[in-house]
Amino acid sequence: MSNSDHAASDYTNELVHRYVDGLANDAEIEELSHLMKSDPDVADLFVRISRLEIFLEDRYGQRRQEEAVVRFLDDLFINTESVGVMLEEEEIVAQREAAEKARIESIAAKKLSAFRREQDRQRRPESVVIPRNVFYTTASSLAAAAILLIFLALPDPIPVAPIPVFVASIDDAIDARWSDPNLSTASGTKLFTLGNLVLTRGVVRIAFEGGAKMVVEAPATLELLSPDSARLVWGRLVGSVPRSEVQLTIQTPNASIVDLGTEFGVEVNRQQVTHLHVFEGRVSATTLDAKGKTALQRTVLVDEAVYLQPKTGA
């Protein structure tokens, strides 16, 4: 898929979300209606997102007007019943996969339990005087056999998920909402290294444990990496460091930006072009090429702005 196709897909996705969230204006609603009539994939996307939003908000006590969504589909002559059957079939497949996963985990647990019972039944033999050379030969053989038995009896290793680390907290928020309905935007909410955070609405100010602060504006996708660093996948943020001994590093798809005691803004658009603006102080910017290697390093001073192109690092 080309960059233009990606951009069109992202724009359509955003347009559907704006309608479902009640943010779309008349022109956007008319455009969405035209896209759904001309492209079945867009209609399918709209139905999936609409039903998912209705399910989530019904589950967590914020029921949306389902009749409005159904009425919009009826105006476009979309058979909601057939789409519902399709979604039910997908749910059945998901249930089967969950059942198979549970069956495999049960087998692994039984193997481990049987191995432990076998260990408990073993008895320590009475001491017997054995010639030294015979003792060493026998001990080596038994040790090798024991290691082989343990290796065969143990179940296949199960991947262990990384332990989330507390690195920051929400300092303030204005009409903010995460894509994860279980994650609060209230002041004081602790944030961990849990992968990508998707801000779908409003503005949040994040206070890092290292002392730096960062204001993120929706829509944006970011990942907290440590008490003094984060990765901006796309979107806009403003970082600030109050004292010279405090540091803040922002990684983007093609750059690494280190705040040297200042205030700066970073934007990553859908084409993965990084825009850097320094409002106060100075910033060290390192660009990366397509292989992730350093292409160029420079210090950006106050009131300067640079545009970092993807892949080339220019």
Image (cartoon, rainbow, N blue to C red):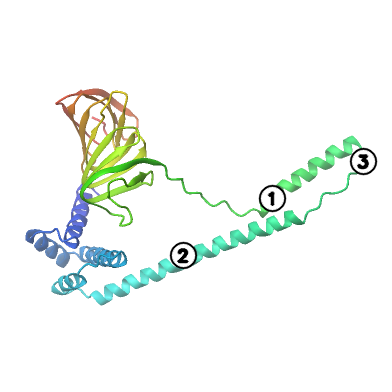
| Label 3 or label 1, whichever comes before in sequence order | 3
> Relative to 113, is 229 above or below?
above
Which mark is on residue 98?
2
Where residue 230 appears, as percent x and y from the top left, is 32, 38
- From the viewer's perspective, is 268 left or right of 161? left
Instruction: Please tell me how crowded label 2 is: few (under 14), some (14-19), or many (20+) other residues with Cα within 10 Å.
Output: few
For the residue pair 304 and 152, the one nearer the viewer reads as 304
**Residue lying at 31% horizontally and 45% vertically, measured from the top left:** 188
How much space separates mark 3 and mark 2, taking CA atoms?
A: 56 Å
For the residue pair 99 and 57, the one nearer the viewer reads as 57
| Residue type, numbered disc 1 | Ile
Residue labelled with disc 1: 150
Instruction: Look at the numbered disc 3 and give the secondary structure of its residue.
Output: loop
Q: Do we see residue 271 in this rendering? A: no
Residue labelled with disc 3: 129
Residue 292: image quadrant is top left
**Residue lying at 15% horizontally and 61% vertically, measured from the top left:** 22
Instruction: Look at the numbered disc 2 and give the secondary structure of its residue.
Output: helix
Badges 3 and 1: C-beta atoms under 8 Å apart?
A: no
